[in-house]
Image (tube, rainbow, N blue to C red):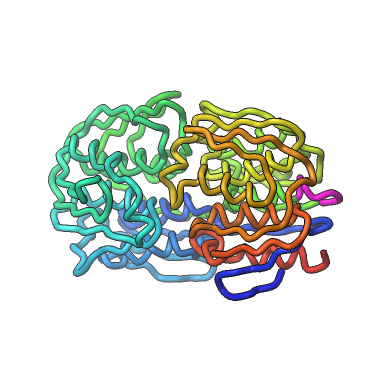
Amino acid sequence: MEEVSRLELRLSPCKALRGEITVSADKSISHRALIFSSLARGKSRVQNFLQAQDTCATLRCLGRLGVDIKSEKPGLIISGTGWEGLKEADDVLDCGNSGTTMRLLAGLLAGRPFLSILSGDDSLHRRPMQRVMEPLRMMGAAVYARQDGRAPLVIMGKQLRGIEYRLPVASAQLKTALLLAGLQAEGQTVLSEPQPSRDHSERMLSAMGADLILTSDSITLNPGRLLEPQDFVVPGDISSAAYFMVAASLIPGSELLIKGVGVNPTRTGIIEVLRRMGADIVLEHQQVVGGEPVADVLVRSAALHGTSVGGSIIPRMIDEVPILAVAMAAADGESRIDDAGELRVKESDRLAAISTQLNKMGACVEELPQGLLITGKPQHLRGAEVHSLGDHRIAMSLAVAALVARGETLLKGAEAVDISFPRFWQLLESLTRNC
C-alpha cells in the first residue's frame, strides 16, 4: 500500500490475511454512552470510547452545552448534572459530518429552555432532517430548517408532550432522538417501527433507570425518572469488523481472528448473510460486557455464492450494505439487495456510489430504486481509479475490493475513513505488508 498523498492511496492485491486484530470501538454505542451520561447526575465512565471525527463532534457539542467531559485512558469521565445542567451554547453547534450527532441532539435540545443552532459540513447539509423534525413538532417542539427540510436546524426549546408515533422507517437515530425528547416530556411516549432497528439506546437507558416497557414491536417510555450514572465499556464495532470479515472470506488462505466485537443481535445481519453465502465465520468466547453481547470473530477464507436479501434484515446491517456488495461482486452467481433505499440519504447516495465505483473495477452491478442487482464473478475484479466520494463506508469497501482485484487500484478520498475508523489504514497495512 503506497500513499500518493493524504487523499490518494495505491492498493495492491493480497495473497492472504492471517493473524489477530482489534477494530475500532463501536460508533453508535460511543455516541449514545456520551449523550446519556451527560444527562445523568454524577460521574459516568466510558471505556474504549471511539476517538473519530463523528463521535468527537458529539463530544465537542456537549462541551459547548456545559457538560464536563475529561479524557482518562482508556476513555472518558463525564460529570453529568442532569437535564438542568445543560446550558445555552454561545455559538452554533457544529456537528461536522455526523447525522447521528445532529438528530440525537435535536431530540435532546427540543425540550431545553433555550435557543440552539445545529449545523455541519456540506455533506450533512444535504441530508434530510424532516423525518426527525415532524415528530418533534408533534411533541410541541419549535424546530426550524431550510425550506427543503435540511440543516442547519434552529431549535427553541419548549415543554414537550408525549406522543404515540409509528416511525416511517426503521431508524435507530430517529428512535433515539424521540426517546431523548420523551424523557423530558409530560406524559407517556409510545414508539413503534416497521422492523426492529439497533437497540443500544434501549439497553443503555434501561440500565440507567429509565422507565421503559419493551415489546417485540413497541417501546413505551414513562418520563420522570432521573438517569443514574453508569460505567460503559464500548465493544469493537461490527460495522468496522465487517470489512475484514469480507476480505478474509474472499482472499484464499486467510484465517483472521477479530477480537472483542459487539455482536448485538440487532447488528449481526452481515454475519448471517455472509454465512448464507458460504462464509466460514465462527463466534468464539461469547460474553456480555456492559449489557452488550461481545465475541471474538474467527473468519477463514471460503468460496462465496450469490444470495438475495431484503426486508427485516436490512436495518440489522444497513451500514454494511456497501461491503456486502463487494462480497457479492466477487462471489459466484447473481445476488440482489432490496429495501435499502435509506442508503440514498447517507453521507453519499451509497447505492449509486458503490455500484458506480465497483463497475469501474469490472464488476456487474445494476442500480435498483431500493437496492442493487449484482452478477458476481470470482477473481473478476480488476484494479482501477476509484473514489470514496467523501464517504467512509465507500472508502473502506473499495479498499477491500482492491485487495481481491487484479492489478493496482488508485483510491482517491482515502481520508474519509477518519469519520469512523481512523486506524483503518494502519490496521490494513499491518495485515498486508507481507503480501
Q: Quadrant of residue 434?
A: bottom right
Q: Position of residue 187 (x, y in %)?
A: 19, 32
Q: Quadrant of residue 56?
A: bottom left
Q: Position of residue 378 (x, y in %)?
A: 78, 42
- Reply yes or no: does residue 257 show up in magenta: no
Left or right: residue 82 versus residue 27 is left
- Along the line of sight, which residue is nearer the eye, 356 or 153? 356
Say above or below: 134 vs 101.
Answer: above
Q: Position of residue 186 (x, y in %)?
A: 17, 36
Q: Quadrant of residue 329?
A: top right
Start-end of magenta stretch:
248-254
Q: Quadrant of the N terminus?
A: bottom right
Q: How many marks?
A: 0
The residue lying at 45 percent from left, 60 percent from top is 45
Q: Quadrant of the C terminus?
A: bottom right
Left or right: residue 340 versus residue 260 is left
Camera sees residue 40: no
Camera sees residue 44: yes
Report the residue that reaches farthest toward the right. 253
- Reply yes or no: does residue 251 show up in magenta: yes
